[in-house]
C-alpha cells in the first residue's frame, strides 16, 4: 500500500511514518517544513533503513499537489499537516482557517479526481469543547471550540461527514487525539518546538535540561482532585500505532469512522510533574500562576470504541513517555552542542 502522509516530518507524522514503513508500507511525505525540520527525513531513514519519497510542497497548493497525485499511485492518505497552536490561532484566525480548511479541501478534491478513497484525518479532543461529563465518548457532543484552531477541526469534521454522505466509496477515519507526549526509543524523533513551548511536556523538558527556570502551573483552583488541569497524556508511539490500525480498518471499506485516541486515564499537572521526576530523577521546580484563557478543568478519553473497532490498546505509560521525551530532549541538546 502506498500512503501519502502530509506533515510526515512533524511530531506525530514522523512517528507514524516509522511504524508504517516497519509494517511494509510505501510512504510519500509532503511537508513544507513550516513546523518541522528536514533532518527528520534522515532520522526516519536511520531508524527504518528506508528513505521515504519526500516532496517539499504546501498541501494548499493544488497545482503542486496535483503533480504529486499524478505521479504517485496513492492508495491512502494520512492528513497531519496543519497549524496547531491554540494561542496563535486566536491572534491569526484567518491564517488558521485558510490553511487548515484549504489543505483538507485540496486533498478531498484530488481524492475525487484521482479515485483515492481512503483518508485518516488528525482531529482533536478540542472538538468536545467544555465537556458535560468525562470520559469523553465519540458520541459526546461536539461543541463550539474555544479557539479558531479548534474550530477548524470542528469544521473539517463536518466537511468530512458531508463528503462521506455523497461519496459512499470514501473511507474516512477521523481520529480525535488527546495529549500526545513522549518520543521514539531511538531518541532521534520527538517534539522540539522553537521558542517558548505552549504545551506542558515540552515546557517541562526545557526546565529539566536547564533551559528554563521553572514550570508555570496554569491554575490550582479547578474542580479536580489537586486543583490543577487533568488531561489524557498518550505516548506518541501508541498514537502512531492507532493510525496503522485505522488504515487497516479503512481497507475493509468502513465508510466514515470516528474514534478517540487516548489512554482513558486522566493525569493532573502536578501529578505529571511528579511522574516526570520519578521517571527521570530530575527535580522540576514549578510556580502556581493564574489560569490560562480557554483551558478546561478535565478531559480524558473513553477508549472502548478504539479497543472494539481497532483493537487499540496502549503499550506505554505516562512514566515511559516522560522518560522517552526527556531522553530525546537530552539527545537533541547534545546534537545541538556539537
Ligand atoms: N499547562 C501548564 N503550564 C504550561 C502548559 C500547560 O500548567 O506551561 C497545563 C494546562 O493548563 C493544561 C495542561 O497543562 O491543564 C495541558 O496543557 P497543554 O497545553 O499541554 O495541552 P492542552 O490540553 O491545553 O491542549 C492540547 C493540544 C491542543 C488540543 C488539545 C486537545 O495542545 O492542540 O490538547 O484536548 F486541541
Image: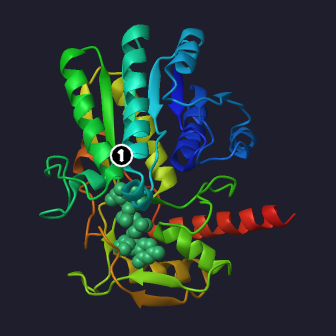
The picture quadrant for ligand 1 comes to bottom left
- Residue at 40% x, 9% y is 113
Q: Please determine whether, in this image, residue 87 is positioned above or below residue 276.
A: above
Instruction: Please identify the quarter of the rendering in which residue 147 is found.
Output: bottom left
- Residue at 73% x, 38% y is 45
Give x and y (percent) for residue 2: 54, 20
Position of 206 with respect to 143 (left or right) is: right
The residue tagged with tag 1: helix, strand or loop? loop
Frontmost residue, 161 versus 93 = 93
Q: Is residue 132 visible?
A: yes
Position of 117 with respect to 188 (left or right) is: left
Q: Which residue is mark 1?
A: 312
- Residue at 45% x, 65% y is 317
Q: Is mark 1 within 8 Å of ligand 1?
A: no
Rate crowding at label 1 as few (under 14), some (14 to 19) or many (20 or more) other CA atoms within 10 Å.
Answer: many
Give x and y (percent) for residue 291: 33, 80
Amino acid at each position: 500500500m502506498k500512503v501519502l502522509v502530509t506533515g510526515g516530518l512533524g511530531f506525530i507524522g514522523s512517528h507514524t511514518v516509522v511504524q508504517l514503513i516497519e509494517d511494509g508500507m510505501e510512504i510519500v511525505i509532503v511537508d513544507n517544513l513550516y513546523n518541522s525540520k528536514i533532518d527528520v527525513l534522515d532520522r526516519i531513514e536511520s531508524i527504518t533503513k528506508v528513505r521515504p519519497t519526500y516532496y517539499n510542497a504546501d498541501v494548499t497548493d493544488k497545482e503542486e499537489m496535483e503533480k504529486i497525485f499524478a505521479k504517485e499511485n496513492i492508495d491512502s492518505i494520512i492528513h497531519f499537516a496543519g497549524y496547531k497552536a491554540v494561542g496563535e490561532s486566536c491572534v491569526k484566525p484567518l491564517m488558521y482557517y485558510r490553511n487548515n480548511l484549504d489543505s483538507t479541501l485540496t486533498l478531498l478534491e484530488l481524492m475525487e479526481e484521482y479515485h483515492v478513497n481512503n483518508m485518516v484525518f488528525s482531529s482533536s479532543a478540542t472538538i468536545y469543547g467544555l465537556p458535560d461529563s468525562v470520559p469523553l465518548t465519540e458520541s459526546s457532543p461536539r461543541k463550539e471550540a474555544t479557539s479558531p484552531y479548534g474550530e477548524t477541526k470542528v469544521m473539517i469534521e463536518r466537511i468530512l461527514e458531508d463528503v462521506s454522505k455523497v461519496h459512499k466509496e470514501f473511507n474516512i477515519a477521523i481520529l480525535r487525539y488527546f495529549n500526545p507526549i513522549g518520543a521514539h526509543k531511538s531518541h532521534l524523533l520527538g517534539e522540539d518546538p522553537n521558542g517558548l513551548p505552549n504545551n506542558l511536556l515540552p515546557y517541562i523538558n526545557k526546565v529539566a535540561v536547564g533551559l528554563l527556570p521553572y514550570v508555570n502551573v496554569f491554575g490550582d483552583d479547578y474542580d479536580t482532585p489537586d486543583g490543577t488541569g487533568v488531561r489524557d497524556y498518550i505516548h506518541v508511539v501508541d498514537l502512531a500505532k492507532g493510525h496503522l490500525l485505522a488504515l487497516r480498518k479503512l481497507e475493509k471499506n468502513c465508510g466514515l469512522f470516528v474514534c478517540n485516541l487516548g489512554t482513558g486515564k486522566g493525569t493532573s499537572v502536578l501529578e505529571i510533574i511528579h511522574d516526570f521526576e520519578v521517571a527521570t530523577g530530575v527535580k522540576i521546580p514549578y510556580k502556581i500562576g493564574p489560569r490560562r484563557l480557554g483551558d478546561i478543568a478535565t478531559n480524558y478519553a473513553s477508549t472502548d470504541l478504539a479497543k472494539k473497532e481497532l483493537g487499540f490498546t496502549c503499550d506505554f505509560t505516562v512514566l515511559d513517555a516522560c522518560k522517552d521525551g526527556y531522553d530525546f530532549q537530552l539527545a537533541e541538546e547534545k546534537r545541538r552542542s556539537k
